[in-house]
Amino acid sequence: MVHIGNIISAELARQKRTKAWLAREINCERTNVYNILKNPDINTAVLMRISKALKCNLFAHYSREFQKKRGKA
């Protein structure tokens, strides 16, 4: 199962970006970013904003998960 909060955290670390930076980029409070990172799920509009900010297709993680599960069916 994809835990998108963990994936976003890892991408932030890989890019050496802070949670405060992400909050500014997606125009929200830093506390909201902490809440996003704790959750395994995310609203697609928010995921799109984060993907654009990080210049990273975070939706691809869901596609890979879908393909793995589909292959097992």
Image (cartoon, rainbow, N blue to C red):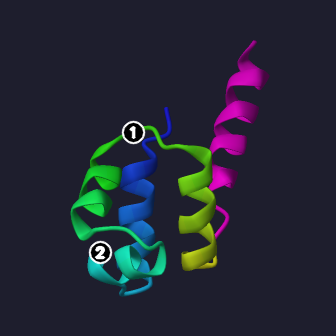
Q: Amino acid at mark 2?
A: Lys
The foreground one among 46 and 57 is 46
Crowd around label 2: few <14 · some 14–19 · many ≥20 (10 Å): some
Disc 1 vs disc 2: which is toward the camera?
Answer: 2
The magenta stretch spans residue 4 = no
Q: Which mark is residue 40?
A: 1
Q: Are marks 1 and 2 in contact (CB under 8 Å)?
A: no
Q: Which mark is residue 19?
A: 2
Label 1 sits on a secondary structure element that is: loop
Q: In the rendered view, tell whether residue 13 sits above or below residue 40.
A: below
Query: Horizontally, is 20 left or right of 60 in the view?
Result: left
Q: Residue at x 64, y 42 (%)?
A: 62
Residue 40 occupies which quadrant of the picture?
top left
Quadrant in which the C terminus is drawn: top right
Residue range of the region highlighted in magenta in the rendering: 56-73
Q: CA distance from mark 1 to mark 2?
A: 17 Å
